[in-house]
Amino acid sequence: MTENKSEPSHHGMDESSHRQYPNETLKLLIERGSCRSFSDRQIPNDVLELILEAGIHSATGGNLQPYSIIKITDAATKEELDRLCGAQVFVATAPVDLLFCIDWRRLQRWAQLQNAPFAANNSFRHFWISFQDTIIAAQSISTAADALELGSVYVGTVLECFRELRQMFKLPDGVFPVVLVSLGYPKVRPLPKKKLGAPVIVHDEKYHESSDAELLAAYEEKYPSWQKEITPVRLETFERVCREIHGEEFARKCLEAIREQGYFNVAQNYFGLHYQADLMVDRNADFLQITEDFGFGWFKP
Ligand SMILES: Cc1cc2nc3c(=O)[nH]c(=O)nc-3n(C[C@H](O)[C@H](O)[C@H](O)COP(=O)(O)O)c2cc1C
């Protein structure tokens, strides 16, 4: 999944700033960006250990740390991961990939060895919190990497290959892959991307729904003049998605709007072309089955 430079990216717009910050931590947090291009420079062991330690010291529900991190440096394994994750080449070129997994297996074994009751694999509460624990650890690692002038990017497409990952990394029951992080020294330091601002994201005291005009203006500010060219293949895909989800009449209306405006807008690209709405709801039953196959039963009566 490489970016075509002649086309706008769904990742959004770069934002350069000459802003002053009260300290380096805030600068680091606000000016961060995902890194998808790594140099050949290897990560010294002590640097990697420090970065991992930063993740391991994250907040975690009950201080239970129900996660494991698979550290991957083997070239053949990284190439296989690149392929499985939808040809995202940086997965192979990064010196290190980290696979973050929910891990109730270790706690289950500990409970057994200590004559304690255990049902975390069958508890939505535990699953929900451990998902958050896992991501929070990943984010601390990503921030620590930035602080040491490395770069990183999350790779969410591991969800397309859960079963293969289970085989590749010999994951036992109770261990569930959540996300991959590719890590290394950037070829070029990534620029931060434009985001919706605090006035849109933060609600004072209660949820406040903006007007349609305010909402459209906020997204226009995030993706100014974003347009994607109309091609017959894209039109066909877009029409199929609209028809599948909302029916013929909706598809006709949308196609008319696209022909009139002369391009795909950013929302149409996100939900009609990039994350095709009909495919996004596909495989829900399979994911439940995978969850069960991985030793979790929290969704069963
Ligand atoms: C859960 C998650 C999954 C992601 N998966 C991918 C991915 O598969 N490929 C990719 O290139 N970027 C991936 N990203 C990175 C996002 O595209 C990126 O964070 C977003 O475009 C905003 O850009 P920024 O991180 O530079 O601010 C992912 C990010 C998150 C948080």
Image (spheres, helix red, strand yellow):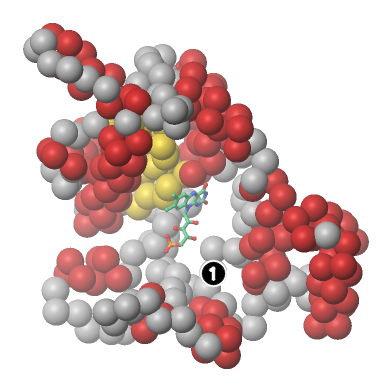
* Residue 6 point in image, percent of width and height: 70, 67
Q: Is residue 212 left or right of residue 142?
A: right
Image position of 15 with respect to 271: above or below: below
Identify the secondary structure beneath mark 1.
loop
Residue identifier under label 1: 12
Nearer to us in this view, 299 or 20: 299
Q: Is residue 231 left or right of residue 181?
A: right
Going 17% across and 17% down the picture, which residue do you hit? 117
Answer whether residue 57 is visible to the viewer in this image: yes
Image position of 93 with respect to 140: above or below: above
Q: Residue furthest front?
A: 301
The number of discs equals 1
Image position of 25 with respect to 149: above or below: below
Rate crowding at label 1 as few (under 14), some (14 to 19) or many (20 or more) other CA atoms within 10 Å. Answer: some
Going 53% across and 83% down the picture, which residue do you hit? 215
Q: Quadrant of residue 67?
A: top left
* Residue 69 point in image, percent of width and height: 30, 31
The answer as to whether callout 1 falls within 8 Å of ligand 1 is yes
